[in-house]
């Protein structure tokens, strides 16, 4: 039987590139000067264009913030939803996928994520309500998978799924402040390390011991993980 060819993604146009350049410049200015302290002229100057040309892409700085929020907060919720409903996946595999997806999204958009975290209150309605709803949905998707793992014995009995979900999401979110894409450790390795930490915290003691072939292996894994985070923390402190 003939196979259906995979559709090709359209190439980014010059207009797409300019739109992204505007969002990138706005993100940096929102971080540096705050959302309230940034105006359209600041963004136009940073991009090297006119205020009139800027309005072709975005009618206001609020519209830019709306797009940045959708690209991070709402996408995070949609990614989590694509995993949390897959009950055929063992809970530990589903949680690993959830963590790697969420951390990967943040690590690929660290500046945008920081903007959204700091400026969400500046969003006009109904966008602010939608962003808050997406955050709640993300938490619920994590809680659902964690609770399934507790009920099924993959995760420790007596664990509070809500606290565990908040802790793991917080660990992912904090990477937006210390991760440096120019560093030696690539984003996918950092996301995998965060997933390892999250799963180790939840697995029963017996399961954690069974994963380590020996004491030296376990110590070596811990040292490698700590070295990654210590190196990134040092870079963050120097900036």
Image (cartoon, helix red, strand yellow):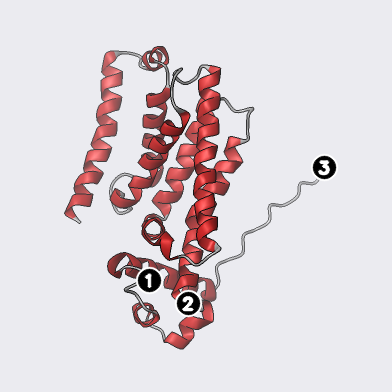
Q: Quadrant of the N terminus?
A: top right
Among numbered discs 3 and 2, the one appearing first in the sequence: 3
Q: Secondary structure at mark 3?
A: loop
Q: Are marks 1 and 2 in contact (CB under 8 Å)?
A: no
Check disc 1 and report the residue beneath it: 25
Which percent across, then down, holds residue 15?
53, 76
Q: Quadrant of residue 216?
A: top left
Residue 167 position, x and y percent, is 38, 36
Q: Earlier in the sequence, mark 1 or mark 2?
A: 1
Give residue 166's quadrant in the image.
top left
Question: Mark 1 falls on what kind of element?
Answer: helix
| In front: label 1 or label 2 | 2
Label 2 sits on residue: 60
Would you say 165 lies left or right of 46 here?
A: right
Cα distance in 3D space between marks 1 and 2 = 14 Å
Q: CA distance from mark 1 to mark 3?
A: 50 Å
> Foreground mark, 3 or 2?
2
Give the Cα distance between marks 3 and 2.
52 Å
Kindly identify the residue that appears in the image at 42 percent across and 50 percent down: 106
Direction from residue 57 to residue 40 in the image, left or right: left
Please give the name of the residue rendered at 47% of the width and 87% of the height, measured from the top-left corner. 52
Residue that sits furthest to the right in the current view: 1
Tell me where residue 79 appears, x and y as whole percent.
55, 45
Examine the rendered structure and indicate whether residue 59 appears above or below residue 2.
below
């Amino acid at each position: 039987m003939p196979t259906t060819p995979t559709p090709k993604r359209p190439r980014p146009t010059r207009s797409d590139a300019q739109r992204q350049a505007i969002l990138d410049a706005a993100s940096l200015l929102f971080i540096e000067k705050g959302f309230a302290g940034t105006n359209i002229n600041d963004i136009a100057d940073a991009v090297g264009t006119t205020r009139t040309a800027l309005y072709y892409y975005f009618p206001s700085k609020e519209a830019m913030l709306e797009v940045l929020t959708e690209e991070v907060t709402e996408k995070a919720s949609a990614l989590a939803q694509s995993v949390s409903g897959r009950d055929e996946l063992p809970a530990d595999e589903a949680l690993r996928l959830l963590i790697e997806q969420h951390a990967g999204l943040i690590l690929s958009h660290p500046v945008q994520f920081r903007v959204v975290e700091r400026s969400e209150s500046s969003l006009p309605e109904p966008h602010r309500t939608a962003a808050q709803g997406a955050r709640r949905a993300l938490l619920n998707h994590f809680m659902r998978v964690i609770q399934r793992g507790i009920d099924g014995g993959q995760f420790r009995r007596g664990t509070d799924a809500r606290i565990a979900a908040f802790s793991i999401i917080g660990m992912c979110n904090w990477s937006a402040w210390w991760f440096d894409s120019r560093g030696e450790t690539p984003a996918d390795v950092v996301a995998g390390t965060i997933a390892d930490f999250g799963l180790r915290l939840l697995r029963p003691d017996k399961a954690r011991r069974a994963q380590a072939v020996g004491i030296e292996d376990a110590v070596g894994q811990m040292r490698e993980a700590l070295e990654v985070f210590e190196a990134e923390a040092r870079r963050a402190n120097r900036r």
